[in-house]
Image (tube, rainbow, N blue to C red):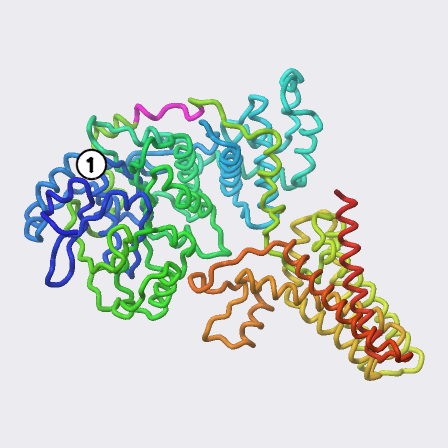
């Protein structure tokens, strides 16, 4: 870390000096960029300045840069710093001149010509030498991007179906040499996929059959959904939306890495202020991430060099904590996860630590932690550091830091936090730039160069990298068929799972719902008959009959929804608040029958069976959600508040940095359940053998037999139905 600034920084990153009496320069090894970095601090702590310093240092090392600039702060990289000011602040004016001579800052402005206009090409297919998994992932992201452009949330059932449909449609069209190159062409295919088979010669020698085209038309989304999707695609070809896909240089990483002036290092600032809506910004960042990811996979490094730096400012809206998943989150997550082995350095900055997915923050090997005044923010920082096993004693002193002061955590340099004061910038720093100011910063030479690159975006330099035919369907179905996906109980709905027969636990749920519906309908009939016959039970019987009828009707609504997946999803969501009320009512029926309040003695065994099954699934749900971190057990919350939150929301997360999310599959639950039941059964048999001399078994024996029999029946039925389906 110590030494002469200009000499020691030749092969390192001069980022500042130590705070305190020893003001030695702090120089990070260039390799630290490869393992990613993050700047954390409140507004005004100096995060953006710190990011600019890393950008300047990367350019001085010959590393090109991509910057996502949501606010316009980073566009000021195109403005030179004042030499006198740099010198007065102890800066190196020779290095500042080197920055000015080396950096070629381009400000790209989508949908506007104020800067360098740039447009998206969401129809550019994955290319290059990709392995099977990478091909599937790249096509999946392409389909996800198009679904997002049409305002479909791929985390919702209909959005997943649309993405799966587009995935298959794009790949099928590409196999036949008819990949759509614009929105009208894709809209026509979406409206009627079978037009791909109008020329029989195209099908000869391909893996595509007429039956596959028919399945595309009928097997993924309903015709009304396809027609609406087609209309949305056509709408993208009008007005401002059309400019996003037609005005300027088509987004291409190789083009953006090419210097306009030989010997310069490109600094590409993606200025998002020209995009009028959050939806357009998310779509732009998602498509940029996809293009960068495809480039990364197609250009493997020869050694350990850092090939480019990607910085994203104020990432919270794009990388929020689970369960929120905006369009750009998945691709940026992949860049952070896989970038280091391809020499792509990823750097982010945020003032909202609690709002950013901790799994992405954890990918940053180097942390710059600035001023945090709020206790809850400091707690989040402390939790994040605990995950990495780092000392957290300094966290309480974070409010004392001034602008430009950080605690630096870099295991490549020191195992202890480094008190850092940033150096002075070589570029200018100030308020965000508006579009008019950006226009003045783009030279005629750069505009002429960009105009020469604004060619037809339909040109494909390399053939598409298609997944193998066998990999196509798994690539689409990973969302629904993932064995590690969270299991959610739907006591109010779920009978369609009997038709689905995808796994034993889902079928068990369907059988449970069917059993509960029958029992509730029977109790309704019995209670009403008893009340009409002799008025026995009074208001309690009448109220019980009404509740049973309502519950039985609600639990059967999914049958009426048929194949309408979106309606089924809405029914389940609306029914969630009364799921647990249903379980309570089954218990009330059981206790009311035993106490004589309800004349249901003849239905006691079915009631016990329904009670066992519904209670079992509630217990499984809470157990599984606890493992997955879906019940918030914050220290300041009471148990009652936690359970109430689970009943009303079921989406709360354990604090990410306190409890790393565990994965648990449905097979794990089945094995756990079967093991517990077998163990209990062995114990019960042992008790029965011990009491065999007693010819009159205790009253509880029959009840235990009913409950064990119910669970074994569920296990047996579900297993047999799944095996038969397979």
Does 174 sit above or below residue 223?
above
Q: Nearer the viewer, residue 62 or 414?
A: 414
Q: Position of residue 72 (x, y in %)?
A: 28, 47
Left or right side of 163 for 536:
right
Q: Main secondary structure of the magenta part?
A: loop
Per the image, the residue denoted by label 1 is: 103
Other residues around mark 1 within 10 Å, as few (<14) / some (14–19) / many (≥20): many
Residues drawn in magenta: 451-458
Q: Nearer the viewer, residue 136 or 438?
A: 136
Q: Nearer the viewer, residue 563 or 383?
A: 383
Q: Position of residue 490 (x, y in %)?
A: 68, 60
Does 707 sit above or below residue 205?
below
| Quarter residue 456 falls in | top left
Name the residue located 37 percent from the left edge and 23 percent from the top edge.
Answer: 455
Give the tally of numbered discs.
1
| Quarter residue 702 falls in | bottom right
Quadrant containing the C terminus is top right
Q: Position of residue 316 (x, y in %)?
A: 39, 54
Does 332 sit above or below residue 681?
above
Q: Position of residue 144 (x, y in %)?
A: 52, 41
Left or right side of 444 for 334:
right
Q: Residue furthest right?
A: 533
| Residue 243 visible (yes or no) | no
Name the residue located 57 percent from the left edge and 32 percent from the top edge.
Answer: 187
SS of the residue under disc 1? strand
Please say whether residue 452 is one of the residues in the magenta stretch: yes
Q: Residue furthest top?
A: 201
Name the residue located 47 percent from the left edge and 59 percent from the top edge.
Answer: 660
Please say whether residue 593 is one of the residues in the magenta stretch: no
Left or right side of 623 for 115:
left
Left or right side of 630 for 550:
right
| Residue 215 visible (yes or no) | yes
């Amino acid at each position: 870390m110590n030494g002469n600034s200009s000499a020691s920084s030749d092969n390192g990153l001069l980022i500042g000096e130590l705070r305190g009496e020893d003001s030695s320069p702090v120089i990070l090894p260039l390799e630290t960029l490869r393992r990613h970095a993050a700047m954390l601090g409140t507004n005004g702590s100096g995060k953006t300045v710190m990011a600019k310093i890393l950008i300047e240092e990367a350019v001085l090392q010959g590393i090109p840069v991509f910057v996502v600039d949501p606010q316009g702060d980073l566009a000021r990289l195109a403005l030179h710093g004042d030499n006198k000011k740099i010198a007065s602040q102890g800066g190196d004016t020779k290095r500042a001149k080197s920055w000015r001579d080396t950096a070629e800052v381009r400000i790209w402005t989508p949908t506007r010509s104020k800067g360098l206009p740039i447009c998206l090409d969401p129809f550019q297919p994955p290319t290059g030498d990709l392995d099977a998994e990478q091909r599937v992932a790249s096509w999946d992201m392409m389909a996800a991007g198009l679904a997002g452009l049409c305002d479909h949330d791929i985390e919702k059932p209909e959005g997943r179906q649309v993405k799966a449909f587009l995935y298959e449609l794009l790949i099928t069209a590409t196999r036949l040499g008819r990949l759509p190159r614009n929105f009208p062409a894709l809209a026509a295919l979406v409206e009627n996929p079978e037009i791909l088979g109008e020329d029989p010669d195209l099908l000869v020698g391909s893996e595509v059959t007429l039956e596959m085209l028919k399945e595309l038309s009928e097997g993924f989304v309903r015709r009304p959904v396809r027609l609406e999707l087609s209309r949305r695609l056509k709408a993208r070809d009008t007005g401002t939306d059309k400019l996003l896909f037609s005005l300027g240089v088509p987004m291409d990483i190789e083009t953006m890495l090419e210097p306009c002036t030989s010997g310069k290092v490109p600094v590409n600032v993606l200025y998002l202020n020209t995009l009028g809506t959050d939806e357009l910004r998310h779509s732009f960042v998602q498509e940029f991430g996809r293009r960068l990811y495809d480039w990364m996979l197609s250009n493997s490094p020869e050694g350990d060099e850092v090939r480019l730096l990607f910085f994203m400012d104020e990432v919270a809206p794009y990388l929020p904590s689970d369960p929120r998943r905006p369009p750009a989150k998945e691709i940026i997550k992949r860049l952070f996860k896989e970038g280091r082995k391809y020499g792509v350095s990823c750097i982010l900055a945020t003032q909202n630590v609690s709002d950013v997915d901790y799994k992405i923050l954890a990918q940053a090997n180097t942390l710059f932690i600035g001023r945090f005044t709020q206790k809850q923010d400091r707690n989040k920082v402390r939790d994040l550091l605990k995950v990495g096993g780092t000392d957290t004693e300094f966290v309480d002193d974070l409010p004392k830091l001034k602008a430009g002061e950080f605690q630096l955590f870099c295991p490549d340099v020191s195992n202890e936090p480094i008190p850092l004061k940033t150096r002075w910038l070589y570029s200018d720093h100030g308020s965000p730039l508006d579009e008019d100011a950006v226009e003045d910063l783009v030279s005629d030479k750069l505009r002429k160069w960009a105009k020469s690159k604004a060619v037809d975006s339909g040109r494909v330099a390399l053939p598409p990298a298609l997944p193998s035919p066998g990999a196509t369907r798994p690539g689409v179905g990973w969302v629904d068929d993932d064995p590690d996906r969270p299991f959610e109980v739907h006591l109010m709905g779920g009978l369609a799972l009997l038709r689905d027969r995808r796994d034993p636990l889902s079928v068990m749920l369907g059988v449970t719902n069917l059993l509960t519906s029958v029992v509730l309908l029977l109790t309704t009939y019995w209670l009403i008959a008893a009340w009409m016959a002799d008025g026995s039970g009074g208001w309690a019987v009448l109220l019980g009959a009404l509740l049973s009828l309502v519950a039985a009707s609600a639990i059967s609504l999914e049958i009426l929804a048929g194949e309408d997946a979106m309606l089924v999803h809405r029914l389940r969501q609306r029914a969630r608040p009364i799921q647990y009320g249903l379980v309570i009512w089954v218990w009330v029926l059981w206790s009311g029958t035993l106490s004589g309040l309800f004349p249901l003695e003849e239905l006691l065994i079915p009631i016990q069976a329904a009670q066992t099954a519904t209670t079992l699934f509630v217990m499984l749900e809470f157990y599984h959600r606890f493992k997955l971190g879906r019940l918030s057990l914050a220290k300041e919350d009471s148990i009652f508040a936690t359970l109430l939150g689970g009943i009303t929301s079921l989406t709360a997360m354990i604090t990410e940095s306190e409890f790393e999310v565990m994965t648990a599959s449905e097979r794990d639950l089945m094995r756990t359940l079967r093991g517990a039941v077998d163990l209990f059964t062995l114990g019960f048999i042992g008790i029965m053998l011990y009491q065999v001399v007693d010819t009159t078994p205790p009253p509880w024996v029959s009840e235990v037999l009913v409950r064990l029999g119910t669970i074994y029946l569920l296990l047996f039925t579900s297993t047999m139905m799944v095996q038969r389906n397979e």
